[in-house]
Amino acid sequence: MVTLLLKKQLRNLLEQNDPDTAEFEANQLLQWATGLDRSALMLESEVGDKAAKQAIDAAHRRLKGEPLQYIIGQWEFYGLPFKVGEGVLIPRQETELLVEKAIERLPEKGVLIDLCSGSGCIPIAIAKTANTNLCYGVELSGEALGYFRENIALNGADTDVIPLQGDVLYPAEELLDELPAKCSVITANPPYLTAEEMANLQKEVRHEPESALFGGADGLDFYRVIFGVWKHKLERGGSFLAEVGDGQAETVRSLMENEGLECEVYSDLNKISRVVAGKYL
């Protein structure tokens, strides 16, 4: 079978899910199954039976709701590759704003602590982009931590990023002792979906770990705790940056300000208030 014919077959299948994304997803699955680059897909290249079957089987998995990112096993974030799969949150484009704003506030050779690190996309992207000393990432899930460690190796960040397992809401003394006494920036992308949002999740998102999504009835459980628990790790003049859900920014801002942080709110490309940043004066 040739690439253009296989791509048409994939697109026809995927249109049953979403006509708007079928072309993109067909290209992604075709590249993944064949190993061909985007330009080669435009030619009448021959595709072996094994690769063609793999691509078609993957399209059927998509029709059942399995995330495209899990099928491919890897996704790009901030221009870098990250391994993903069952048990870890898929990196989202809107989280790149958190990375950008953290880099802006991180001094040269500064130290960063990332909370709820998941795949490690935030500390790894920052370490590979900014002139940092070290980036630490704290993650509770053993499954997610496995992906975190793989992504450190994948991106050559072994000397720049240190993954640690721990509960950010109730950090053990052993965890706190492994971290620096003070750091320049703390980042967090905690679970922030509400009970209502969890009840109405898209079928793809239901494959992702609930522990990385659900933030309590109003989505704010983590924010009520982490600023008070972790602000003492910030050096004076340091910043605490948190990603938030749609409509949560002002409440999170108030929670930060109650802990003595001077706050700014930043909006993403969709004009949604997405990052709350507080400076520890």
Image (spheres, rainbow, N blue to C red):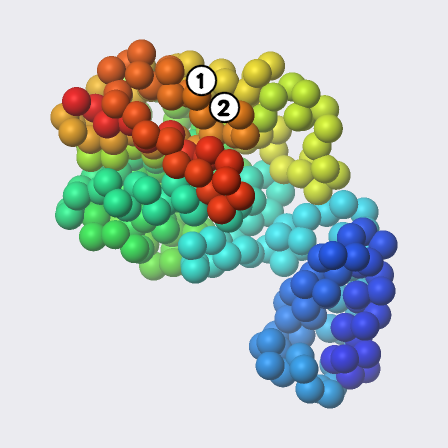
Q: Nearer the viewer, residue 230 or 259?
A: 259
Q: Quadrant of the N terminus?
A: bottom right
Residue drawn at 73 percent across, 28 percent down? 200
Q: Amino acid at mark 1?
A: Thr
Quarter location, residue 90: top right
Instruction: Locate the C terminus by quadrant.
Output: top left
The residue drawn where x is 66% and y is 79% is: 41
SS state under label 2: loop
Residue 198 or residue 30, whichever sits in front:
198
Residue 179 at x, y percent in the picture: 24, 30
The structure residue drawn at horizontal position 32% and vertical position 30%, both measured from the top left corner, is 264
From this view, report whether residue 241 is shown above or below residue 40: above
On screen, residue 29 versus residue 161, left or right, reads right
Location of mark 2 (residue): 248
Q: Which residue is mark 1?
A: 251
Q: Residue 274 vs residue 240: left or right?
A: right
Image quadrant where residue 223 sits: top left
Instruction: Please state the horizontal and vertical placement of residue 186, each as a whole percent of the image.
Output: 29, 32
Q: Is residue 78 visible?
A: yes
Helix, strand or loop at label 1? It is helix
Distance from the alpha carbon under mark 1 to that under mark 2: 6 Å
